Amino acid sequence: MTVPFKVDLTGKVAVVTGGGGVLGSYFAKALAECGAKVAIMDLNQEPADKVAAEINEAGGQAIGVAANVLDKEAIEKAREIIVKELGTVDILLNGAGGNNPKGSTDDEFYNEEEVKKNPELKTFFDLDPKGVGFVFDLNFLGTLLPSQVFAKDMIGKKGANIINVSSMNAYTPLTKIPAYSGAKAAISNFTQWCATYFAKTGVRVNAIAPGFLVTKQNEKLLFNDDGTPTARTGKILNSTPMGRFGEPEELIGAILYLASEEAASFVTGVVLPIDGGFSSYTGV
Ligand code: NAD
């Protein structure tokens, strides 16, 4: 991967949670390419090590660390390893998160007739509180707990900052995914809260809000085998003024900008949409 522009992160230590995932691995590689020493933190050691190995092979410096972002003790242990191997953290990128079918409905609109015809349909009334809680915890607590653990080392450190990952769902919820939408709205809100809370310490806190991206993982859900868009894809593209999906690489400029003290020293509490205009368009 080649970054769109270079910022100087030489000597900085970055932690990317969910760094073994699709977007997290892009973020980690971009930070490494700009000189940061990167800890790839993921639920499992293997994907974290794989991304770290790719960075090291490309001439960067990275380690893989396993930790559940919902387990504060595990994050603290991961912090000890990171501090020992790379030094105290300057940049925390909270990339772990995502949706889960357990927090989703099958229907877009409630329709009594449909429910009578298909009693198996999972509606709002069937949502399992545990499923909703799982999605909220993964996204919200999974951002709050690593921030608690790593921000302590950032206080008073020049250029230290946190980048969270929100979503288009945070502005206006998408159908079927109330838990994920609410959890990402909480991330945007928490980003502003933390930006204020840490403002006098020099620690900046910002977020990106990616729009709809195509990745190898979701390609099959978005397009039929013949390459034509699925019905939901058609709706997404019609709601995106640029009329296309984004690529993970298109998030990198925002990550580097927010991470760089030279570029963004007076920027804190922003949630930056990277969405082809989705959040600006009413559809009319
Ligand atoms: P992904 O599933 O590829 O990556 C998530 C990573 O987080 C995985 O490697 C997973 O192992 C790890 N993870 C999951 N639970 C964890 C836990 N409890 N502790 C530690 N690590 C854990 O997802 P992605 O598409 O790369 O998404 C990354 C972030 O971007 C998420 O917050 C997601 O909500 C957000 N996002 C993604 C998109 C998109 O289109 N892909 C759009 C908007 C926002």
Image (cartoon, rainbow, N blue to C red):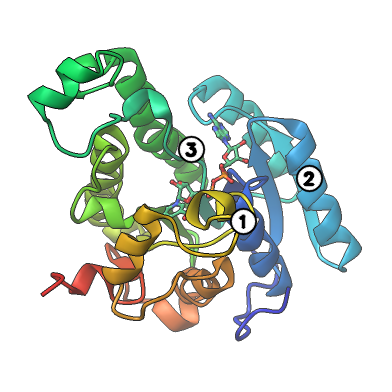
The image quarter containing residue 195 is bottom left
- Coordinates of residue 167 in the picture (x, y in percent): 34, 54
Considering every residue shown, the one lying at the far bottom of the view is: 5
Amino acid on which the number 3 mark rests in the picture? Pro
Secondary structure beneath label 1? strand
Spatial separation of the CA atoms under disc 2 and disc 1: 12 Å
Q: Residue at point 59% right, 58% down? A: 215
- Ranked by sequence position, the earlier of labels 2 and 1 is 1
Do the numbered discs 3 and 2 sit on residues whose CB atoms are within 8 Å? no
- Ranked by sequence position, the earlier of labels 3 and 2 is 2
- Ranked by sequence position, the earlier of labels 3 and 1 is 1
Structural crowding at the residue carrying mark 3, measured as other residues with C-alpha within 10 Å and reported as few (<14), some (14–19) or many (≥20): many
Q: Residue at point 63% right, 29% down? A: 67
Spatial separation of the CA atoms under disc 3 and disc 1: 12 Å
Q: Which residue is under mark 2?
A: 85
Please state which of residues 214 and 36 is positioned toward the viewer in this rendering.
214
> Is residue 203 visible to us here?
no
Q: Which residue is under mark 1?
A: 14
Spatial separation of the CA atoms under disc 3 and disc 2: 18 Å
- Is label 3 within 8 A of ligand 1 (CB to nearest ligand atom)? no
- Is label 1 within 8 A of ligand 1 (CB to nearest ligand atom)? no
- Coordinates of residue 61 in the picture (x, y in percent): 81, 60
- Coordinates of residue 234 in the picture (x, y in percent): 35, 63
Q: Which residue is under mark 3?
A: 146
Camera-nearest label, 3 or 2: 3
> Is residue 284 visible to us here?
yes
Q: Quadrant of the N terminus?
A: bottom right
Q: Quadrant of the C terminus?
A: bottom left
Seen in the picture, residue 127 relative to 169 is either above or below; the reply is above
Camera-nearest label, 2 or 1: 1
